[in-house]
Image (cartoon, rainbow, N blue to C red):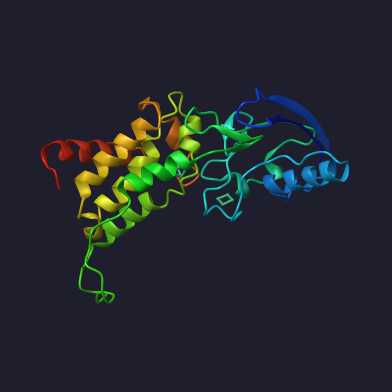
Amino acid sequence: MKFQLKIWRQDGPQDSGKFVDYSLEDISSDMSFLEMLDILNNQLVRKGDEAIEFDHDCREGICGSCSLNINGNPHGPDTGTATCQLHMRRFQDGETIVVEPWRARSFPVIKDLAVDRSSFDRIMAAGGFVSVNTGNAPESNAQLISHDTVESAMDSAACIGCGACVAACKNSSAMLFVAAKITHLAKLPQGQPERTKRAAQMVTQMDAEGFGACSNTGACEAACPKEIRLENIAQLNRELVRAAFCSK
Ligand code: SF4
Ligand code: FES
């Protein structure tokens, strides 16, 4: 397959950046999108040009490192799929593909397609521990949790922290990410210590990082590679009401 690529190049946070055109030939339809970028980078390096910066790590939809707005869609055209799991067969032979970084004030561009998502780390750090007595691992059946509760908590825990929800939202809201993190702990007995404090602190940090308010359009849910549901945001709002009445 061949492709025309319009790729965002930006030297650093202070550079204004611009699209640069590239042509690629002999791309296998079975290649992933990131493998296609690897081929392009190999060609650039062989010519003595600078490689295009982009984030990746596991390349199997687990770590949340990959990003990329592809033809205007966070993680590209497939639903429930991270950029690293997207294949070139999803594009037409000869197609022009526009590749940009996440666009959000709270995710400043570091270089080219790589953005700084440490604002998510700071939100996690604001609420990310519980006070429990440590010791030997408890007996596995000591705390029974219903199957439905476990499944529901695990659905929320599937969030990989990629930031596509922010990139898709016209307000750059981080509500879906924060809601997933708060909800999965709120549903389990292990998450009850500091439950309300955690919700209030994480939301306070989310606001301090400059993320916008929820737009209620559901663009976040549509873009999420882990199909985190909007119900998590409803649960987050319930947790905030609870926090207003209870300080534990
Ligand atoms: S909610 Fe979905 S889109 Fe947002 S950070 Fe988590 S996995 Fe990524
Ligand atoms: S590289 Fe890890 S989720 Fe895509």
Position in image of residue 12 (x %, y %): 64, 32
The residue sitting at 30% across, 54% down in the picture is 129
Q: In the picture provided, is 73 more to the left or to the right than 154? A: right
Position in image of residue 145 (x %, y %): 23, 63
Q: In the picture provided, is 63 more to the left or to the right than 124? A: right
The answer to whether any part of residue 218 appears in the image is: yes
The residue sitting at 64% across, 30% down in the picture is 71
Q: In the picture provided, is 224 more to the left or to the right than 244? A: right
The residue sitting at 64% across, 36% down in the picture is 113
Which one is in front, 209 or 141?
209
Position in image of residue 181 (x %, y %): 35, 47
Quarter residue 144 falls in: bottom left
The answer to whether any part of residue 231 appears in the image is: no
Q: Residue furthest right?
A: 47
Q: How many marks?
A: 0
The N terminus - image quarter: top right
Which one is in front, 181 or 204?
204
Position in image of residue 173 (x %, y %): 40, 30
